[in-house]
Image (spheres, rainbow, N blue to C red):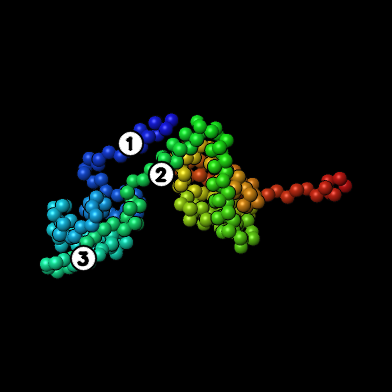
Amino acid sequence: MAADRRSRSESTMGHDPHGDDGPRGPRAPRGATRRRILTTLKKSDGLTADQLAGLLGISAMAVRKHLAALERDGLVASTTVRRAVGRPVHVYRLSSLADDFFPKQYDLVITDLLTDLVQIDGEQKVDLLLARRAERTRAFLADRLRSATTLAERVAALAAGMDDLGYLASCEQVDEDTFLLKQYNCAINRVAACFPGACYYEAQMYRELLGAEVERSTHIVAGDHMCCYVIRAPKPHPDPAHSTA
């Protein structure tokens, strides 16, 4: 299973046929030239605008224009270096923010490690790890829900908390007692696809935090475009005194 996941991942890691192997992602800088600048800086320990121009085959003036935009966006940082001869020069390097745009395979590594753990120590140990992760997430969300009193406020606070965790979450009120919690991104999609316990603990966590009935109606792992939870206010229990009257 791990080998299959690795082969699928590696199939997307080859060179871009157009020669643009730069950073990817929704927040990556637009424009092939700026991506080439970031990629070239990634492969260096710092370059001047003139050095970049020579490597990229474009004018130094154009490079400086792109560098100014990248520096303004916090993707590039410059330092002034004084030389024995001539004027000081600006040396450009990637910022830590820019490094996030380059491919990472944390999810693949984690999934492989969990798969190995199943083989070495059994599924219960992985289930324990997923439960402990859910507890940490629950503690974070419980803090967000602390001041919420109504179910509507709790659902809204839960959606905001999950959005902060990278799930692109939002909520919608259907009627007085029914709400939808929509998550358009799964921050642990690869792990959840291999270990369904992650999704089980998420739903259970929502039930406990909201004190409500929670049912998943759509599921990213199943191929849907989002995970949607239908949340309903708990039904009141009948009064025993009236039921025996």
Q: Is residue 33 left or right of residue 145?
A: left
Q: Which residue is mark 3?
A: 81
**CA separation, marks 1 and 2?**
14 Å
Contact, mark 2 vs mark 3 (Cβ under 8 Å): no
* Dot 3 amino acid type: Val
Q: Which residue is depicted at the point 25% across and 45% down?
A: 21
Frontmost residue, 90 versus 61: 90
Q: From the viewer's perspective, is the residue at label 2 or at label 3 nearer? A: 3
Q: How many marks are shown on the rendered structure?
A: 3
Which of the labelled discs sits on residue 174, or is there none? none
Frontmost residue, 245 versus 125: 125
Q: Which residue is mark 1?
A: 10
Q: Is residue 10 left or right of residue 117?
A: left
Which of the labelled discs sits on residue 106, or is there none? 2
- Residue 221 visible in the picture: no
**CA separation, marks 2 and 3?**
36 Å
Q: Which residue is depicted at the point 50% across and 35% down?
A: 117
* Dot 1 amino acid type: Glu
| Quarter of the figure that contains the N terminus | top left
* Dot 2 amino acid type: Tyr
- Give how far across and how far down residue 130 sits, in percent: 54, 42
SS assignment at label 3? strand
